[in-house]
Amino acid sequence: MLTLWKYIVLLLPAGVLAGIASSVAGLASLVSYPALLFAGIPPVAANVTNTAALVLTAVGSGATSKRELHGHLRELLKLLP
């Protein structure tokens, strides 16, 4: 069983790498999901954690891009299912 410090040492760099991969190419799951599994988190919990992080990243990205997206509401609505 990993102690708290071992989790921090393992998952903090993985989180930074996932953030970089997400900002560059949207590939955060390639880093974060295997890191969560390697830390011993069950697959379903790792998947839920990873999905929640991706949703929050998308919300944050949209919020920070509000100025650039202004005036493109019609195009954005076409993307919705």
Image (cartoon, grey):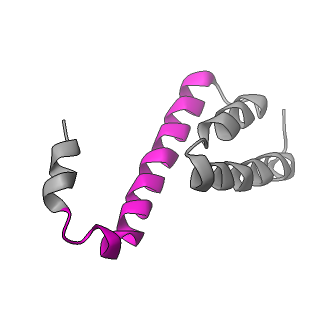
Q: Is residue 74 above or below residue 42?
A: below
For the point 20% across and 63% down, which residue is it?
72
57 relative to 35, above or below: below
Residue 31 position in % (x across, y down): 70, 39
Q: Nearer the viewer, residue 79 or 12?
A: 79
Q: Quadrant for the C terminus, please.
A: top left
45 in the magenta segment: yes
The magenta span reads 43-72
Q: The N terminus appears in which quarter of the rendering?
A: top right
**Percent x, y of residue 69:** 29, 67
In the displayed structure image, the side of residue 22 where residue 66 appears, left or right:
left
Q: Residue furthest bottom?
A: 67
The dominant secondary structure in magenta is helix
Residue drawn at (86%, 47%) of the image: 6
Q: Is residue 55 magenta-colored?
A: yes
Quarter of the image where one finds residue 59: bottom left
